[in-house]
């Protein structure tokens, strides 16, 4: 299926690794022009070169950095057709194992740049009647424990998705969110490595994923993101998509 994304300029934050990198490669396969905005130049720049896209090195925890990134895309390409807000990290800032300043820093890492990137890209998105996909997390609706910053940021992202979908109706800009659950990414591997028995923990997690008892592949998240950005999803907005093998909603008796 041709998704009609050819030549569309799509900004992907956190596109250097994991889910973001999978989205970048999927966009390139659809002949879009992906723009990676990430602090990790060592991984992001080679991917951008490989797929014929663009890389912008940026630490997105300030509004100024977000504005500069958007301005650079506009300078080079003259347009922004879509935005994928993806950058973030589950940083284990909990209620007890945390403090107010670390909590606020977690929000800067995981939430504020979603708003900032959308705000600064909005004139271009209006001109293109574009689309936004926000990558959230199952932690927004299930909780996880000891991750107040990340979970509350992802919950806010779900709220912003609905709010922006409503606000941007007059401009034909569609806004949707994807909620992954268990996806094997470099950050996930790093977390497993901190545990006493990573293999046993992974086996336990997989046993509780109803569909096929396996992790969701980053490429499956990427396929959903590309479809939501495309005209094939032209009447879908304000939706929260769970790409998780039934992890969140199906009866635990199944596992």
Image (cartoon, helix red, strand yellow):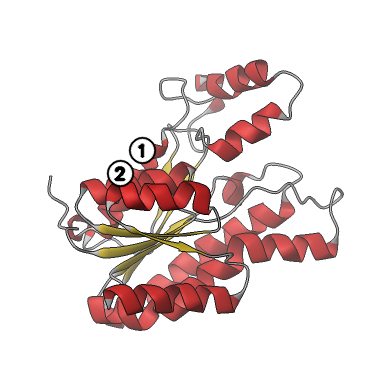
Q: Quadrant of residue 162?
A: bottom left
Q: Residue at x 34, y 78 (%)?
A: 74
- Dot 1: few (<14), some (14–19), or many (≥20) neighbours within 10 Å? some
Q: Position of residue 76 (x, y in %)?
A: 31, 74
Badge 2 element = helix
Residue wearing tag 1: 219
Given residues 152 and 103, the one toward you in this image is 103
| Number of numbered labels in the structure image | 2
Q: Quadrant of residue 155?
A: bottom right
Q: Residue at x 75, y 66 (%)?
A: 104
Q: Is residue 76 left or right of residue 60?
A: left
Given residues 212 and 1, the one toward you in this image is 1
Q: Residue at x 55, y 19 (%)?
A: 207
Q: Position of residue 62 (x, y in %)?
A: 62, 73
Residue 16 visible: no
Given residues 109 and 145, the one toward you in this image is 109
Q: Position of residue 56 (x, y in %)?
A: 45, 64
Q: Position of residue 230 (x, y in %)?
A: 22, 58
Q: CA distance from mark 2 to mark 1?
A: 6 Å
CB atoms at circles 2 and 1 under 8 Å apart?
Answer: yes
Residue wearing tag 2: 223
- Dot 2: few (<14), some (14–19), or many (≥20) neighbours within 10 Å? some
Q: Residue at x 29, y 82 (%)?
A: 170
The label on residue 165 is none
Badge 1 element = helix
**Quadrant location of the N terminus in the rendered image:** top left
Q: Is residue 86 left or right of residue 150?
A: left
């Amino acid at each position: 299926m041709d998704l009609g994304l050819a030549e569309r300029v799509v900004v992907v934050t956190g596109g250097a690794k994991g889910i973001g990198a999978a989205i970048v490669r999927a966009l390139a396969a659809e002949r879009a022009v992906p723009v990676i905005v990430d602090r990790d130049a060592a991984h992001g720049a080679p991917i951008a070169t490989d797929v014929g896209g663009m890389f912008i090195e940026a630490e997105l925890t300030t509004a100024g950095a977000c504005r500069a990134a958007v301005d650079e895309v506009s300078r080079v390409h003259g347009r922004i057709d879509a935005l994928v807000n993806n950058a973030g990290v589950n940083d284990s800032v909990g209620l007890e194992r945390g403090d107010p300043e670390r909590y606020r820093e977690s929000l800067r890492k995981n939430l504020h740049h979603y708003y900032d990137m959308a705000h600064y890209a909005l004139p271009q998105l209006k001109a293109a009647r574009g689309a936004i996909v926000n990558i959230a997390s199952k932690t927004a609706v299930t909780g996880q424990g000891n991750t107040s910053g990340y979970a509350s940021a992802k919950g806010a992202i779900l709220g912003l998705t609905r709010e922006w979908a409503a606000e941007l109706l007059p401009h034909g800009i569609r806004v949707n969110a994807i909620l992954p659950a268990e996806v094997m990414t470099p950050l996930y591997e790093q977390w497993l490595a901190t545990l006493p028995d990573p293999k046993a923990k992974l086996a336990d997690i997989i046993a509780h994923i109803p569909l096929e008892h396996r992790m969701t592949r980053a490429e499956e998240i990427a396929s959903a993101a590309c479809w939501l950005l495309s005209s094939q999803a032209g009447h879908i907005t304000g939706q929260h998509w769970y790409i998780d093998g039934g992890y969140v909603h199906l009866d635990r008796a199944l596992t």
